[in-house]
Amino acid sequence: MISKEVVALRLRRQHLINKSELKQYDKLYKDLQPGLNVYWKGFGDPPSLTFRANFNDIEYNRKRQRDRTLRKGRFNGGNLGWVLNEDFELFACLYQKPMKSYSGNVEVLLDLIRTEGPMNIHQMKEFTGMLTKEITPALHNLQKAFLIYEDQYDGEWDRAWYKIEEIFPELNLEKYTKEQALEVLINRFVYRNVSITKTDLKSYFKVPAKLYSNVLDKMVNNGVLVKLNDSYLLKEDVYNLENIDEDINRFVLALHRNDFLVRSKEDELKLKYKHEKHDILQYLLIDGIIKGAVYGKFRYGPNEIKDVRVDSDVDLQGRKEEILNAILNENKDSEILMFNGEKL
């Protein structure tokens, strides 16, 4: 059972109970990278730290995309995300998947970009005669190897692909070992989550277990982290937690599936809230802990909400309406059909 002190400090550090100002937001974004857009509803939109800013951070990050402060790449598990330009090299060193050889479509496209210069997929089709379905996976493999870069600086879909050195002339993919890069990122991850487990690292970073286990052991041996049972926290937080005296006000948030807190617990949450029929639309953060899920079908219009399930240890006395309102705030014009298996 997670302690109320850990919950309180986590909420504060992630600015879920104290919305961040601009300067705080910049530090928060750095620690919560890679930034992602709102799950399902945010196609083409800039990343957002939902519920964590006292300003429109989507518009703020749109400006940061345009001036290339934010850079796009394939990081955690090969998934797309946005990192700060200053941290691109760090993430590239951790997530690069080098290609031992080049052949087929990969070789054709890499040679084309290197000889002809930047081009979009339509131009690649004209040069090669290949189909989009042949081009796209090859580009993704080259992108994961950090040999090419997709310059998406706005919401347009017709964007150019460059050889990586044209965008990052000083990029050094050997500057950090994977362990060194992961240690930097784990330090940030633990700070914002306060207490973490190996399962959390597996969920979020999507790197081999041996890699994060080695880094954890090193950080414990060096006195950076302290291990308590199956959890790890920063050494200074052992003291910090002893001095927290903070009551958490009652609140409910429906977190989308790209939320940092959700991704930190993704494997655990998927298992706990798996539904035999329906997709998970959102997870319910109730008083600082994820205690339920919203089920249904994603739609390009209003989502279909088939059911809402809340953990049995949640006192629903006077709170059912609060929970329903939190869900509807994130699912405009939707109708909730059931609550804990009962028709509304």
Image: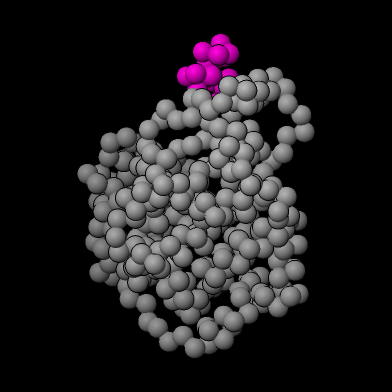
Q: Where is residue 184, by image quadrant?
A: bottom right
Q: Where is residue 148, by image quadrant?
A: top right
List x then y, in percent, for residue 261: 47, 60
List x then y, in percent, for residue 9: 46, 76
Give the residues drawn in magenta, as a range.
Answer: 121-138
List x then y, in percent, for residue 324: 27, 57
What residue is drawn where x is 57% and y is 80%? 237
Look at the picture and state if 19 lies above or below 124. Answer: below
What residue is drawn where x is 52% and y is 68%? 193
**Between 15 and 338, which is closer to the camera in this rendering?**
15
In the rendered view of the protein, which quadrant contains the N terminus? bottom right
Query: Magenta segment: does it hold 98?
Result: no
What residue is drawn where x is 44% and y is 76%? 8
Q: Is residue 16 visible?
A: no
List x then y, in percent, for residue 26: 43, 62
Look at the picture and state if 213 lies above or below 167. Answer: below
